[in-house]
């Protein structure tokens, strides 16, 4: 009896390994493209035959790319998927091309969205502020003049439940979940970004070196996004400009059979993000510093004047009392 247990155990383990093998290969077959959330050439045919994408603002369609903004000032453009995404675990691949004539001055960049609201132009890379959902920013221009802990262009993620403001003056550093530096502009080869959301893990990777391989930008854990939001991309130019082109957006379902049960219905949230710090205006700060300095000087002067006046009055009264004494 005792000796029979070992082979049985081996058999059971072998069967388990076999089951694992089968389920992992099954998982691979389920990594498939969701056509209703995918945008590929030819775009004109897409908009007429399969109208699941909307185009607004300065966006123009050509046969080879979708141009969100051209290399001109003060443009805002966006594309939005009109089908809410019910896929729980997904990976979005975006082929893009940011290019322009500016050598040192160009901007502002573009954003990829998974949000509750769509088709609203606004100040955050061409889309609305106080958004509800996920934003991936590909920020080409550093608005922050002070000491920066990173270079630009910079790729970052932000999770918002509608309460947070994107602070351009700080390049969103106070609300960013994670980020990485990435020289994706004016490349002679194709450039791609992959956004993978599986379970509660968000992973962003880039393929911008023309090597046809993904390089991790960052991975963030404890990210909660509900189903039913919309994918989109938007871009903006201000005083500075660039061409912000989208070549394709492809959404892959990466649900594995085991984890389809849990769903999330709450507001977007990220567990490991620092609470937003107060926006402290450097200029105003120095002014208030000077104010305090002047107040102290005035108080000291006041004390001095009071002292002198008091001393004079005291001496006068002493004189008077002396006069009375004599
Ligand atoms: C929304 O997010 C902010 C900042 O992360 C947080 O303080 C607030 O509690 C959240 N509100 C809700 C209703 O979850
Ligand atoms: Ca910026």
Image (spheres, helix red, strand yellow):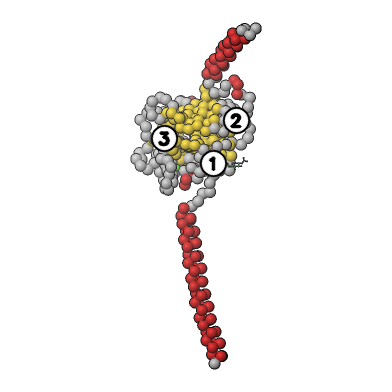
Residue holding disc 3 = 182
**Residue 21: where, in percent of width, then height?**
54, 15
In the rendered image, is residue 48 in sight? Answer: no
In the rendered image, is residue 261 in sight? Answer: yes
Q: Is mark 1 within 8 Å of ligand 1?
A: no
Considering only vertical position in the picture, is 315 above or below 213? below
Who's the residue at 46% across and 40% down the image? 236
Considering only vertical position in the picture, is 304 above or below 82? below
Question: Looking at the rendering, which quadrant does residue 115 occupy?
Answer: top right
Q: Nearer the viewer, residue 318 or 194?
A: 318
Residue holding disc 1 = 274
Q: Residues within 10 Å of mark 3 (few under 14, many from 20)?
A: some
SS state under label 3 = loop
Of tags 3 and 1, the one toward the viewer is: 1
3 or 1: tag closer to the N-terminus: 3
**Residue 62: where, in percent of width, then height?**
43, 30
Considering only vertical position in the picture, is 49 above or below 156? above
Total count of labels: 3
Q: Residues within 10 Å of mark 1 (few under 14, many from 20)?
A: few
Q: Quadrant of ligand 1?
A: top right
Q: Is mark 3 within 8 Å of ligand 2?
A: no
Q: Which mark is residue 112?
A: none
**Residue found farthest to the right:** 1
Residue holding disc 2 = 227
**Residue 153: where, in percent of width, then height?**
41, 38
Who's the residue at 57% across and 36% down the image? 271
Are circles 2 and 3 on residues that touch, CB within 8 Å? Answer: no
């Amino acid at each position: 009896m005792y000796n029979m247990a070992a082979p049985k155990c081996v058999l059971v383990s072998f069967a388990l390994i076999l089951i694992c093998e089968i389920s992992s290969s099954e998982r691979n077959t389920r990594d498939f493209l969701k056509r209703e959330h995918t945008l590929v050439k030819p775009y004109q045919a897409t908009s007429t035959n399969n109208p699941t994408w909307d185009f607004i603002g300065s966006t123009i369609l050509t046969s080879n790319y979708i141009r969100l903004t051209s290399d001109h000032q003060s443009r805002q453009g966006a594309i939005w998927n009109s089908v809410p995404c019910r896929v729980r675990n997904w990976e979005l691949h975006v082929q893009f091309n940011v290019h322009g004539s500016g050598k040192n001055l160009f901007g502002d960049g573009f954003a990829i969205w998974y949000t509750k609201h769509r088709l609203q132009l606004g100040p955050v890379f061409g889309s609305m502020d106080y958004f509800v959902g996920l934003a991936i920013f590909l920020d080409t221009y550093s608005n922050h003049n002070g000491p920066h802990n990173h270079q630009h262009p910079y790729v970052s993620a932000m999770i918002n439940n509608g309460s947070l403001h994107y602070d351009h003056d700080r390049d969103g550093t106070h609300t960013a979940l994670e980020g990485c530096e990435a020289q994706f502009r004016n490349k002679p080869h194709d450039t791609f970004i992959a956004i993978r959301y599986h379970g509660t893990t968000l992973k962003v990777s880039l393929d911008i070196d023309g090597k046809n391989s993904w390089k991790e930008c960052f991975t963030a854990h404890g990210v909660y996004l509900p189903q039913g939001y919309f994918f989109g991309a938007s871009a903006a130019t201000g005083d500075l400009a660039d061409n912000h082109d989208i070549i394709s957006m492809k959404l892959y379902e990466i649900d594995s059979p085991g984890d389809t049960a849990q769903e999330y219905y709450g507001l977007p949230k990220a567990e490991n993000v620092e609470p937003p710090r107060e926006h402290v205006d450097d200029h105003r700060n120095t002014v208030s510093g000077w104010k305090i300095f002047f107040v102290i000087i005035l108080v000291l002067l006041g004390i001095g004047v009071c002292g002198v006046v008091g001393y004079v009055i005291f001496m006068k009264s002493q004189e008077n009392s002396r006069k009375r004494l004599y």
